[in-house]
Amino acid sequence: MSLPSSLITSGFEKHAQKLSNLPHSETARRFYELMSGAVMWEDEKPNIPFSELGWFRAALAYRSSILLGEPRTEFEDIWNALKRIAPDWPGFRLERRTPSDELVAYLNEQRKGLKRSLKRLEAAADGSWKPLFGEKKSQ
C-alpha cells in the first residue's frame, strides 16, 4: 500500500486506532467539515493531535467523494488503511458511507453555501461587495 507521505505521520497507526474506540451515537448530528469539504458526524472525531488531522480529513474527503460518486482515489489507501486499523469507527457505518439522495443533497447544498460565502469574502477583499437584504456597507 502506498499512502500519501505528506499525510501519514509516524504516529498514524497509534492515533488511527483511537477511531475504533469511539462509540456510535444514534443521536449524533452531521455537519459539514470545512477543511476536508466533507460530511462528518459528531461521534466520529477522535481526540488526536493537530499534526494528525491531515490523514483524518483525507479519510472524510474520500468518504464524501464516494457518496458523491466522484472517488478521490488519492485518498483511497488512507481509507483502506483506516478500515484495517479501526474497523469499528462510527464513520465506517454502512449508512454513512453508502450514497443516498439525502446525503448527496446535503453535501451539494453545503458546497453551494461555501461557494457563496467565498464569493462574498472575495468581493469584500477587492472592494466590490454589495450589501444583501438591506445591510449597510461599512465605511
Image: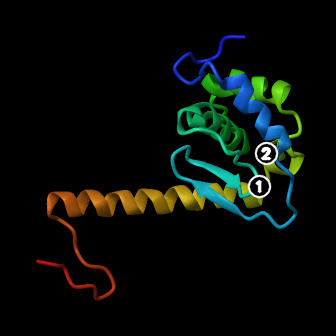
Mark 1 sits on what residue? 43
- Of circles 2 and 1, the one toward us is 1
Instruction: Say which amino acid is labelled 1.
Output: Asp
Q: Earlier in the sequence, mark 2 or mark 1?
A: 1
In the rendered view, tell whether residue 74 sits above or below residue 133. above
Residue at image position (56%, 43%) is: 36
Q: Left or right? Give the position of 53 relative to 88.
A: left
Give how far across and how far down residue 77 sits, in percent: 70, 21
Crowding near pointer 2: few (<14 within 10 Å), some, many (20+)?
many
What is the total number of numbered labels drawn onto the structure image? 2
> Residue 76 at what x, y percent from top left?
70, 25
Residue shown at 54%/39% (left/top)? 50
Identified at 58% across, 37% down, the residue is: 53
* Picture quadrant where residue 12 is located: top right
Q: Is residue 41 above or below residue 6?
A: below
Q: Which residue is mark 2?
A: 91
Judging from the image, what secondary structure is the residue with disc 2 in? helix
The CA distance from mark 2 to mark 1 is 8 Å
Q: Which picture quadrant has residue 103?
A: bottom right
Q: Residue 99 location, x and y as percent? A: 78, 47
Q: Which colouring convention does the figure follow? A: rainbow
Instruction: Classify residue 30 by image quadrant.
Output: bottom right
Q: Which residue sits furthest left? A: 139
Q: Secondary structure at mark 1?
A: loop
Q: Nearer the viewer, residue 90 or 69?
A: 90
Residue 110 vs 77, above or below: the answer is below
Q: Amino acid at mark 2?
A: Gly
Q: Is residue 129 left or right of residue 121?
A: left
Mark 1 packing: few (<14 Cα in 10 Å), some, or many (20+)? some
